[in-house]
Amino acid sequence: MSSTTLHMNTVAGVEVSGDHWIGGRRVASPERFDDVSPIDEQVIASISRGGPAEAAAAVAAAKAAFPAWAATPPAERARLLHRIADLVEERLEQLAIVETTDNGALLRSHLRGVMPRVAHNFRFFADYLVNDLHHPEFETRGHRNHVSWDPSGVAVLITPWNAPLMLATWKIAPALASGCTVVLKPAEWTPLTASLLADITADAGLPAGVFNVVQGYGEEVGDALTGDPDVSRISFTGSVPTARLIARSAAANLTPCSFELGGKSPMIVFADADMDSAVANAVEQYDNAGQVCLAGVRLLVQDSIRDEFLARFVERASSLRQGDPRDLTTDIGPNVSREHVDRIDGFVQRAIADGARAVIGGGPDVDLGGLFYRPTLFVDAQPGSEILTEEVFGPVLTLQTFSTEEEAVAMANGTEFGLAGVLFTGDPDRAERVGAQLVAGTLWVNCFFVRDLRAPFGGSRHSGVGREGGTWSFDFYCDVKNTCTNQDRWTTGR
Ligand code: NAD
C-alpha cells in the first residue's frame, strides 16, 4: 500500500491513529506496515512506516520546540506532566485493552499494575523535579559553587515491545521533566499505545514539538535518529546487538547513550529460605510469558532442598492458566509474534538436543495453538550450554543445584549479563555476604519486582550502560553545570 493519507484504526473499540506524531500534528508515510495481534495473529492496525525523512522531521520539530520548553519554569513543566497523568488515568481502560491487544500481555496486569504505573511515572518525575532535585551550593575561598541541571536538548528514546508504554514513559517522563524535548521510537511490534500517548500529550496542552513519535522498523529509522547531530541524548531499552548498532551510530557525534539491555538473571534459593515464598516467586518468573528482562530465569537451588523445591515448583506451575490475555483469570498469555515464538522454540529444541530435560513444557501449546508457548522448566542442562547463558525471553526457566555459597556465586555470575539477581535465604548475614559478590544492577532479597522510582535502575556488564531513576535520570537527561562565582567582584552592590 502506498499513500500519504492519514489512517485511523479501531482497536478493541478504541480509535488509534496509525501515523507519526511530529510537531504537534499527524504525519503519514508513503509506506505502511501491518500491526498484528499476538492473541489471534490477526492484523489490527495499519501503521506508517517511517524512514530517515520522518526521523529528521521529528528531530527538527523537537529541536525547534526545545528553547521554549527548556525555558518553561519547572513548576509549569510539572503541572503539564501531572495533567498527562490525569488523562492516562481517565483513559486507563482504553490504554490497557489496546496494549493487551497489541502485545498479548495480561489485561489484568495492565489494568491493575502497568497503566497506573504509567501515570505514576509522570507524577513521580514531576514531583521529583520540583521537590527532590537538589542544587548543591558550597563555598570555596570566597567563591560560591552552584550546581544546576540544564536541559540538554533533544532526547531520542527507543523502546521494546514487552512492556511498551511502561518502559517508554519511564524515559519520557524524566526527559520532559528535565526540559528536554522528545522523539520516541516505539517497537514496530507494538506501536499503538505510543500513538494514544501522543493524543494525551496534545490534550494535556503540551506544546507542539515537545513530544514526537516516529513509527517504523528499527533498522529503517534507527540510524537517522541515533546519528542525527541535533540529538543530545539517546536512551534505549532493548537487545544487546541493537545497542551495539546504536552505540556505533551515536559515536559519530559522541552522543551520550543510556542502555537498558538483556539479562539472564539468577534466582538463588538457599536451604534456609522460606520455601513457600521462594517457590511462589520462582513461578512468578513466568510472568508476561517470560518476556521480562529482569526475570530470574536461572533457578539455582541448594542441593539439599532440590527435590522438595522441584516438586512444589512443578505443582504450582502446573496450575497456571494459559489462555486469552483479555480473560481476567488468565495467568499466562501468548508470546509477542510468530518470529519470536520460533526463536523461543529454537532455544528449547536445541537445549533438548543438547541433553537438557524438560520437566514441564518443552514446546508450543498444541491445544491453544497460535503463539501460546507452554511454561517450560529444564533440568540437567550442560554447564556452559546456550540455554544457561543466552537470553531466551520466553517462558523458559532452568534449574541447577549448588552446595556452597562460593559455588552459588560462581554460577550466578557465570554469564555475560548483570541485570538483576534474586536471592532467597533466611539468614541476613548470608544475604549480605552473597549479595555483595553478585554482579547485578538490582538485587532482590526474599522478594521480586519491588520497584521504587527513586532507586537507580540499570544493568552491569552487557546488561546495560548507565543508570536511570530518581536523580540518575536527571543526571542523564541534563547537562549538569557547576557555576563558580567570585563573590567579591560585584559592582552593582547586589
Ligand atoms: P530490539 O533491540 O530488537 O528492539 C528494541 C527497539 O530498538 C525497537 O524499537 C526496535 O525497533 C529498535 N531498533 C532495532 N534496530 C535498531 C537500530 N538499528 N537502530 C535503532 N533502533 C533499532 O529488542 P526487542 O526484541 O524489542 O526487546 C527485547 C530485548 O529488550 C530483550 O533483550 C530484553 O531483555 C530487553 N529489555 C531490557 C529491559 C531493561 O530494562 N533492561 C527492559 C525490557 C526489555
Image (cartoon, grey):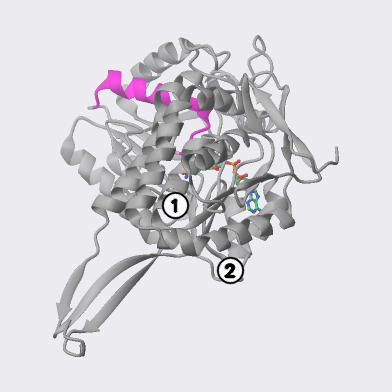
Magenta segment, principal secondary structure? Answer: helix
In the visual, does 223 lie left or right of 72? right
Looking at the image, which residue is at 62% across and 19% down? Answer: 13
Residue type, label 1: Leu
Which residue is tagged 2? 251
| Residue 220 on image: x %, y % | 73, 51
Q: The N terminus lies in which quarter of the figure?
A: top right
| Residue 72 on image: x %, y % | 40, 58
Q: In which quarter of the image is residue 216?
A: top right
**Quadrant of the picture in which ligand 1 is shown:** top right
The stretch of residues the image draws in magenta is 273-293
Q: Which of marks 1 and 2 precedes in the sequence?
A: 1
| Residue 414 on image: x %, y % | 44, 46
Count of marks, rendered view: 2
398 versus 243 height, above or below: above
Q: The C terminus lies in which quarter of the figure?
A: bottom left
- Residue 176 is labelled as 1
